Image (spheres, grey):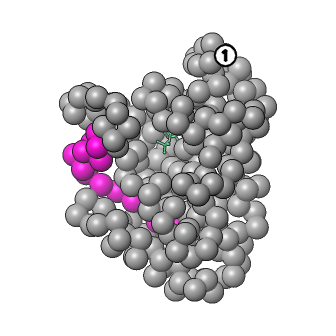
């Protein structure tokens, strides 16, 4: 980490717009982008496919430690490749979202994935998004942003996103699932979702994507030598 190669940590709850924002900031500043949620989703998908019991912490921990999870740069955004298989679309299924939220509460899974995230970002020059990047993975990040949005705004975004992918989701059901995942992420005993003390908190409910991206780009320029 340095002023030439900063770490930009972007955290926030589900459907806060983190991924779109993080990717846009990374593109604009020529930094790498890592979506750590994709790693928890990859462990969840593998556990479902291998019929690993979601209550079996030891088996989930072993899985998290052994999977080969790669981010392969591609024109439309990184492809997520797990043990050689492209799972980019498969990890976005609603069942995987629920399983990822359960899997990510397992301490051993977090320890295994946090170590990988620290290795991926060790050289800096990276925008990393998740729930605990500013608090646990990179507590010394040059820039920490916590994105928030009202449950209603996030429900609408998730609903739109699901429909765009051809999933016919019920709005009330999406709201219920979002609230349930938030509650689980915020109340787990290991690394609960919370803003770092020194994070800049941006409420995106009434902001456009461009406004959010511009605000973060300006912060990065103020706190690093990236232009
Ligand atoms: O951001 P996402 O919806 O793709 O994340 C999937 C799940 O993984 C979500 O329930 C929260 C969890 N997660 C986490 O606990 N820590 C991270 N750094 C990233 C995601």
Quarter in which the N terminus is drawn: bottom right
Residue at 57% x, 51% y is: 35
Q: Residues within 10 Å of mark 1 (few under 14, many from 20)?
A: few
Using the rendered view, name the quadrant where residue 210 is placed.
bottom left
Give SS at disc 1: loop
Left or right side of 46 for 122: right
Point out residue 170 in the picture as x, y percentages from the top left corner: 23, 28
Q: Is residue 158 magenta?
A: yes
> Which contiguous range is marked in magenta?
144-160
Seen in the picture, residue 223 relative to 51 is either above or below; the reply is below
Residue at 34% x, 33% y is: 166
Point out residue 139 in the picture as x, y percentages from the top left corner: 62, 62
Seen in the picture, residue 137 relative to 181 is either above or below; the reply is below
Residue topped by disc 1: 50
Left or right side of 130 for 110: right
One can see residue 86 in this view = yes
Quarter in which the C terminus is drawn: bottom right
Point out residue 159 in the picture as x, y percentages from the top left corner: 28, 39
């Amino acid at each position: 980490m340095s002023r030439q190669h900063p770490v930009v940590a972007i955290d926030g709850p589900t459907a806060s717009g983190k991924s779109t924002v993080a990717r846009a900031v990374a593109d604009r500043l020529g930094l790498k982008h890592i979506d750590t949620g994709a790693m928890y989703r990859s462990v969840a998908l593998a556990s479902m496919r291998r019929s690993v019991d979601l209550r079996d912490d030891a088996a989930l921990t072993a899985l998290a430690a052994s999977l080969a999870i790669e981010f392969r740069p591609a024109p439309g955004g990184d492809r997520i490749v797990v043990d050689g298989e492209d799972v980019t679309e498969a990890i976005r299924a609603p069942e995987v979202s629920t399983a990822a939220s359960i899997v990510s509460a397992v301490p051993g899974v977090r320890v295994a994935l946090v170590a990988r995230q620290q290795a991926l970002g060790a050289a800096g020059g990276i925008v990393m998004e998740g729930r605990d990047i500013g608090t646990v993975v990179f507590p010394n990040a040059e820039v920490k942003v916590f994105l928030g949005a009202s449950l209603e705004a996030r429900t609408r975004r998730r609903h739109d996103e699901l429909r765009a992918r051809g999933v016919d989701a019920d709005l009330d059901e999406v709201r219920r699932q979002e609230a349930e995942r938030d509650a689980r992420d915020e109340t787990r005993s290991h690394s609960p979702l919370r803003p770092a003390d020194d994070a800049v908190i941006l409420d995106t409910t009434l902001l456009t994507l461009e406004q959010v991206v511009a605000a973060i780009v300006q912060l990065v320029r103020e706190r690093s030598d990236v232009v």
